[in-house]
Every structure is written in structure tokens, then in C-alpha cells.
Amino acid sequence: MYICSVVRIKRYEGTESPLFLYQKMFRTTVEKLLKEGLEQKQNLFLIDLTITEDNSIKVVIDGDHGVTVEDCMFISRSIEHNLDREEQDFSLEVASAGATAPLVNVRQYKKNIGRTLELKTNDKVIEADLIEATDNNIKVQWKSREPKPVGKGKVTVQNEAEIAYKDIVEAKVMIKF
């Protein structure tokens, strides 16, 4: 006696793939744990979260008053201690936004009021002092040399401008020694 059966193999592609669904669930879990950790330390905020296909997690944080090693350890533990290494193989790196990293969050602008920024907009690049930061824009001041209205030579002029965040291509804090 012979038993024959037809086996249908379904190919999963794109968003139906079990691997894709697993990675999505893993990302959701990491995001939830990260959010819980940041809620416990309200002075910290997320700059970037990257999770690669091989479950390498990289978290970049900043803080209203800077970031300490203890802050990075706290966030790392809030994620790592709640994931099961038997279930998921992963690597985790938590770092602070570097001193020369571009500003990407409104809170970063607010914490750097009074410091000098290198600002790139669509039409110019300026080095200016950040004097105000709101939820929609920043106010900066800088000095420039412009031709005298009459005669030869140049005169130093104090400039001030409000720039919307959407018009900023890149902003970096200038480190002065």
C-alpha cells in the first residue's frame, strides 16, 4: 500500500516572511524597553535607534545636562536585562551623541543656547551664537564684515535671524579651546 500526498510549499516574501515578522517583533520589543528606560530618566532623550538584520542594536542618546557613563549603562540594562539571550542573539551598544555630531532634536538646540553653532541652510553657511530656541525655530546672532555704505573699506555688522528647523540642513556646536 502506498500513500501519496501533495505538499504545498508556500514561499514567503517581503512583509509576509517569518524572518521579517520576527525582526519587526524584536524591534517593537526593543523600542518598548527603550521607551520605558527613557521614561524613568526624563532628562535623557533618543537621538537614533538602529537595529540591523543580525540584531545588532545601536542606541544614541543625549541629555538635557549631558550624558554620563551611568546613563548609558542604565539604558543598556533597561534593554538587555529584559531580553532573553536564549531566545534572541543580539549585540547592544548605547552611546551618547558626540560633541561634534549634528543637532537633530529640538531639545539639543535648547540645551545649547548661548553656544556657537555652525549652521548650514539651503542658501548659506554661518557661524552664529544661538540665543533662543523654540519648538519651531531658532534665533541666532553673528557678526559679519560688509562694505561701507559710502567710501572704501568694510564695517563690522551685527546680524540676527530666526531660522525654522525645516530650513536647517545641518547644525553643529563649535568647540572652542
Image: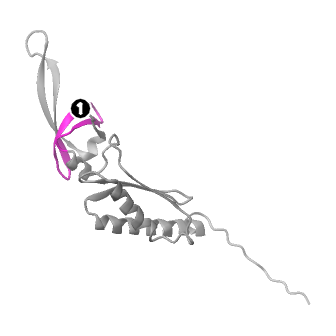
* Residue 117 included in the magenta stretch of the image: yes
Work out which quarter of the rendered image holds the N terminus and state it: bottom right
Q: Nearer the viewer, residue 111 or 85?
A: 85
User: Seen in the image, is 7 located left or right of residue 48?
Assistant: right
Q: Residue at x 18, y 36 (%)?
A: 129
Q: Nearer the viewer, residue 115 or 24?
A: 115
Q: Nearer the viewer, residue 152 or 171?
A: 171
Classify mark 1: residues with Cα within 10 Å, few (<14), some (14-19) or many (20+): some
* Residue 56 included in the magenta stretch of the image: no
Q: Residue at x 30, y 36 (%)?
A: 122
Label 1: element kind: strand
Q: Position of residue 148 (x, y in %)?
A: 10, 15
* Residue type, mark 1 in image: Glu
Q: Residue at x 30, y 39 (%)?
A: 172
Q: Which residue is mark 1?
A: 127
Over which residues does the magenta segment extend? 113-139
User: Seen in the image, is 27 located left or right of residue 39?
Assistant: right
Residue 31 seen in this snapshot:
no
Q: Position of residue 78 (x, y in %)?
A: 39, 67
Q: Position of residue 87 (x, y in %)?
A: 56, 72
Q: Is residue 67 above or below residue 158?
A: below
Spot the residue most to the bottom. Answer: 1
Q: Is residue 73 above or below residue 149?
A: below
